[in-house]
Amino acid sequence: MSFAFKVLVDEKWFDHTDDLPKGVRLLMKPVDDDAKDMATELFHELAQFDGEKVDWEHPDTIRAGRAYDIALMAASCLRWEGIGNADGSAALPMTIEASRAVFGQGPIFRPMTVGFLEPYHYRTAEKNGSSPLPNSITAGAGGETENSPSPLPEEPSGASSETPSGNSTSAD
């Protein structure tokens, strides 16, 4: 079975078509180094370590993993619409604390985990954080960069070429 994830390479609005609550829109940017650093620092504060080894079964480590994902989303959110107080009368100002609270809510956390974080985590697991591989699970996801290799130029028909032994051949 092959998976192809749409990896975020530019800013993108997520909304009800991405399973967010109706009226909520989130403008997200791709996860960058600052977001990763902040989330990693938070994870290390909350996770349970036994020397060098992380205890992945410990409840604090499980909470730290969720906090890591929330921190990645909060640091990657540029703007939101439809986020406010309980009666909807005032928009919630966008602060890091408010962002963490918003992304920690199930109706926002679950769809953003699937639509925003899963492609990022798969790409990271491939050790391919900057661009998709042509034959990987993120194939076709876009994200060509200026460092992407260009196709080799084709040799014109009838041109001479050199064989591996160094002998020159020509097409007739």
Image (tube, grey):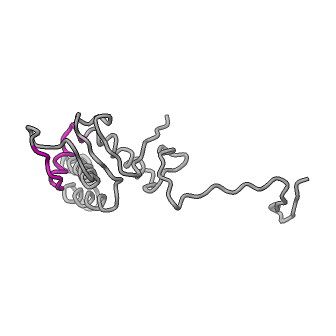
Identify the residue at image location x=53%, y=61%: 147
> Could you tell me how many numbered marks the image carries?
0
Q: Is residue 55 visible?
A: no
In the figure, 72 relative to 107: above or below?
below
Res. 158 image quadrant: bottom right
Is 47 within the magenta? no
Q: Which residues are magenta?
A: 90-109
Q: Is residue 151 left or right of residue 163?
A: left
Chief secondary structure of the magenta portion: helix
User: What's the residue at 39%, 48% (across, down)?
Assistant: 8
- Would residue 101 be counted in the magenta stretch? yes
Camera sees residue 100: yes
Q: Does residue 60 sit above or below 115 in this rendering?
A: below
Residue 91 location, x and y as percent?
Answer: 14, 46
Q: Which residue in the rendered view is the most extreme toward the bottom? A: 166
Relative depth, front residue between 150 and 81: 81
Q: Residue furthest right?
A: 172
Write the residue at 34% across / 54% down: 31
Where is residue 160 shown, x and y percent of the image? 84, 60
Toward which corner of the image does residue 105 lie, by quadrant?
Answer: top left
In the image, residue 2 lies at what x, y percent?
49, 37
